Amino acid sequence: MAIYEKAPAKINLTLDILNKRTDGYHEVEMIMTTIDLYDRVELSTLKEDCIKVTLWSRFVPNDERNLAYKAAQAFKEKYAISSGVHIKIDKSIPVSAGLGGGSTDAAAVLRGLNKLWDVQASIEELAHLGATISSDVPFCVYGGTALAKGRGEIIEKLPSPPSCWVVLAKPDIGVSSKSIFQQVHVDKMQHPRTDVMITSLHHNDFFMMCESIGNSLEAVTINQHPEVLQIKNRMKQAGATGVLMSGSGPTVYGLVQQERKAQKIYNAMRGFCKDVFLVRILG
């Protein structure tokens, strides 16, 4: 028996760093939404009590360092499962890109194992378990559009964004979230208007949404990787209505209502970046 799960990528409409917590994490407030770019995860049972991860990416480990492996391990321990599982991941989401690739794979494993082993855990239970794996996993368990608070584990569902196209452009570098957060100085950051973004979603207002996107980590990442700013400027010049770096970067996205304009921006960015995608918002 095999279970198949889609693992969609996410973009940050807002990302705000509020303060440094006593546990070493940062208190965040961020609005995320899923997009139509996804990995495919296949789960099948093994007779032996082990976890096997198969994927074709030289940038992603297939052992206990992999978040999908950690998710399976946490699920087996939580629900006392003695069976093994083979996890096959067909990756389309770029690695270390600020798009939640590892976290969404882990979330897909949690959802899939819940079906494979007929545990019947609630979505809230799975999200709570996901919080022990990585900060973005709880959101990825739910998917859609949501406000994430705390260190990412407190999820409040939000209305879907206005229908639009998303052009993604990732420079040929990987960014470590840990290294970016180590450079954070909260008192020197620009903070997005999360409240305005929430209002724009409730009113289904595309232009208000584009005006209120913001990411407190953007300046930190640009300081280390100036090519992110070059991509932002290029995408704005090409005509994107709203342009922002997602997560800790380095992927930049542009929001566009018209398909023809989105295709034009996509073509312009393909001559500038290796990894460029044209997708829709799912959330």
Image (cartoon, helix red, strand yellow):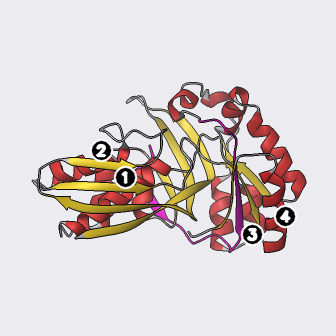
Quote the CA–CA distance across marks 2 and 1: 8 Å
Query: Where residue 68 sits in the image (x, y, percent)?
Result: 34, 49
For the record, the magenta segment spans 151-174
Amino acid type shown at disc 1 = Ala
Task: Please check the rendered image and state whether residue 164 is part of the magenta-colored stretch, yes or no.
Answer: yes
Quote the CA–CA distance across marks 3 and 4: 20 Å
Q: Earlier in the sequence, mark 2 or mark 1?
A: 2
Q: Earlier in the sequence, mark 1 or mark 4?
A: 1
Q: Earlier in the sequence, mark 3 or mark 4?
A: 3
Q: Are marks 3 and 2 in contact (CB under 8 Å)?
A: no
The quarter holding residue 276 reads: bottom right
Residue 206 got which mark?
3
Q: Is residue 177 above or below residue 111?
A: above
Amino acid type shown at disc 2 = Lys
Q: Are marks 3 and 4 in contact (CB under 8 Å)?
A: no
Q: Quadrant of the image for the N terminus? A: bottom left
Q: Quadrant of the image for the C terminus? A: bottom right
Q: Earlier in the sequence, mark 4 or mark 2?
A: 2
Task: Please check the rendered image and state whether residue 179 is part of the magenta-colored stretch, yes or no.
Answer: no
